Image (cartoon, rainbow, N blue to C red):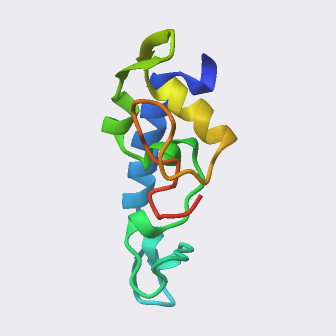
Amino acid sequence: FSGVLAQDVLLALLELQDRLAAATAWAPGAGRNVSLRDVCYAPLNPSQPGVGDCAVSSVTQYFQNNRSRLALSAWQQDGKEQGTVDWHDHLMYCVSSPLSFKDITALELSCMAEYGGP
C-alpha cells in the first residue's frame, strides 16, 4: 500500500474528520450555532444523533474511526501460513466483505462503520 492508503495518510484523515465533526457555524435562521450532528443523516439514531451516529462515508469507517484499531497487529497462523496481520489485511477483507461483523484475521475486527451501518 502507498499513496492515499498509507497509514500516516489514514491517521491524518482521522484528524481532519475529527476537526470537521467538531466544527460549528452560525445559522441565522435557527439563531444558534449548528454542527454536523444537527444536519447529518443518522439512520440508526435519527432523533438525538451524536457525531458517531452520522453516516459518514470514509475508508476509516472500516476501523470505526478509531486510531487504536488502525494501529493493531496480531500474530496469525493459517495452516502452514503464518505471520503478522494488521490494518492492511483488515482493509482488504472489508473491501471484499463490507457487511462483516468480524473479519477472518486474528484481529477479528468489524467492517461495520462507527454508526452501525456498512
Q: Position of residue 24 (x, y in %)?
A: 40, 67
Quadrant location of the N terminus in the rendered image? top right
* Residue that appears at 58% across and 48% down: 58
Q: Nearer the viewer, residue 62 or 67?
A: 62
Residue 24 in view (yes/no):
no
Whole-percent x, y for residue 66 in the image: 36, 44
Decide if residue 79 is in sight here. yes
95 or 31: nearer the eye? 95
Q: Quadrant of residue 93?
A: top right
For the view shown, which residue lies furthest in the front direction?
79
Identify which residue is drawn at 51% across, 33% down. 90
Residue 49 image position (x, y, % from top left): 41, 77
Task: Report the front residue among 55 and 20.
Answer: 55
Compared to residue 118, the image places residue 30 above or below, namely below
At 39% from the left and 33% from the top, the residue drawn is 107
Residue found at x 62% / y 19%? 3
Indicate the position of residue 73 as horizontal and vertical percent values.
Answer: 36, 24
**Position of 37 compared to 93: left or right?**
left
Numbered disc total: 0
Residue at the far right: name it: 96
Asked if residue 51 is positioned above or below residue 2 in the image, the reply reads below
